[in-house]
Amino acid sequence: MRSNPFTFGRAVTGKDFVNRRKELKLVMEAMLSGQSLLLYSSRRLGKTSLLLEAKRRLQRKLDIAYVDLYPITSRQRLAEEIVGAAARSSLKGNLSKIAKGLTDLLSSLRPRAVLTHTGEIGIELVLSERDWKGSMADAFDFGEGLAKKRKRRMVIIFDEFQEIRNLDGLDMEKLMRTRFQLHEHASYVFCGSKRHVLSEMFSDESRALYKFAKPIMLGPMTPDVLKRFVRRRFAQAGGDISDEVTTRIIKTSRGSPYNVQRVCYEVWSLSRRAEDPALVDRAMDDIVEHSSPEFEQIWEQVKGYDQRRLLQVLAQEEKVSYGMDFVSEYALKTPSHVRRSLTLLRKKGLVSEEGRIADLFFSEWVKRQ
Ligand SMILES: Nc1ncnc2c1ncn2[C@@H]1O[C@H](COP(=O)(O)OP(=O)(O)O)[C@@H](O)[C@H]1O
Ligand SMILES: [Mg+2]
């Protein structure tokens, strides 16, 4: 049996990566020239994939360390992850080689290189309790020290950077700025999906990271690029997909490569000769059904009647207006109720900044209730 040529749920690189030519060029040029970046977009538009693809393409020229802030729940872990990622990207060797490289630069933190349960090389550090800022500063300077010593530029990527809020956010931002601004051999990429949180961090004059990085916004992908991708993938894997079906998929997918891959994965498993546009509806039904336990849970967490009602309207209408006609047609009480619910739903991440249900498949699920 031919395996499914579509991938979703993890970052894609190499042959799975559909070229975002312009954005990739911008990111790579910035990395090469030591310009720090702020990359943001809604979830699942391909930020992580873009950064990992840039890392892959530049591996001969630069050392690029990747730190995901999501799983990090303490400053200790943050320090260890930064040092670990920097060491792995630059020292690339066995445990003892890495251990030696560490002690030279980081003796204050008594670093130990260990094998983690996944077989990766991880770092353990001893941070000072009394002077945690001093210890963190040493960890923040590590990439720069390593790059300088090895005479090779380093880039450190912080993915899901908005999570820094949960790690002494303001203090940590200040400390980062004071250290990073002195660095000449290391530059930084901050990446995340909470646009309002990130833009406050980087464009509010009173914040430490104000204008520290050049912002790049990752938008949806164009229908043409996505169409070509879908047709090529089907063909390469020995299948075939009609123009009509492709167009239908792209139309429902809002320019999100994740949505396209998710729907195509399902269409492919229904039929390798995808000619009938009704396949797209069946694929959507299947996805919604598979995801239904998760969506039920989300729905349970939306407590207020007003918010649930608004979600139902958004699933039908795609866009709300605050006008009295609209509000009374859909029994939404008053325009100020609508506004309040919208704010709450946005905070929960269920509704996007543009005022749509953020997850296409959740939207379809709500529609079917
Ligand atoms: N350039 C791309 N080419 C093909 N698929 C992509 C691309 N970018 C993203 N995707 C799809 O979207 C999914 C989410 O991508 P990811 O990079 O994790 O997004 P983000 O970091 O913005 O949340 C991937 O699993 C993949 O299915
Ligand atoms: Mg990501």
Image: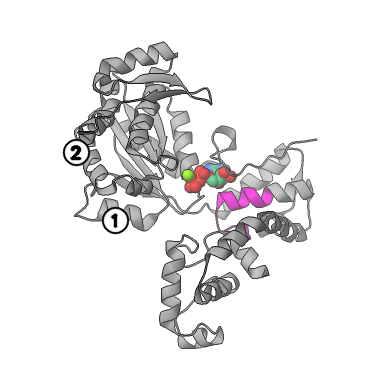
Q: Residues within 10 Å of mark 2 (few under 14, many from 20)?
A: some
- Ligand 1 neighbours mark 1 (CB distance < 8 Å): no
Which residue is label 2 attached to?
A: 178
> The N terminus appears in which quarter of the rendering?
top right
- Locate the C terminus and report the quarter of the image it occupies: bottom right
Query: Does 172 sit left or right of 78 as displayed?
Result: left
Q: How is the image coloured?
A: one colour
Give the main secondary structure of the magenta stretch: helix
Instruction: Report if residue 251 lies within the magenta region.
Output: yes
Q: Which residues are magenta?
A: 249-264
* Rendering quarter of residue 272: top right
Report the disc number at residue 200.
1
Secondary structure under tag 1 reads helix
Q: Residue furthest front?
A: 129
Magenta stretch: includes residue 26: no
Q: Determine whether label 1 and label 2 are within 8 Å by CB.
A: no
- Residue 59 in percent (x, y) is at 43, 25
Q: Residue at x 24, y 33 (%)?
A: 129
Amino acid under label 1?
Glu
Amino acid marked by disc 2: Thr
The residue lying toward the viewer, choosing from 260 and 355, is 355
Ligand 1's quadrant: top right
Mark 1, Cα crowd under 10 Å, few <14 / some 14-19 / many 20+, is: some
Q: Nearer the viewer, residue 243 or 168?
A: 168
**Which of pointers 1 and 2 lies earlier in the amino acid sequence?**
2
Residue 118 image offset from top left, x and y in percent = 53, 26
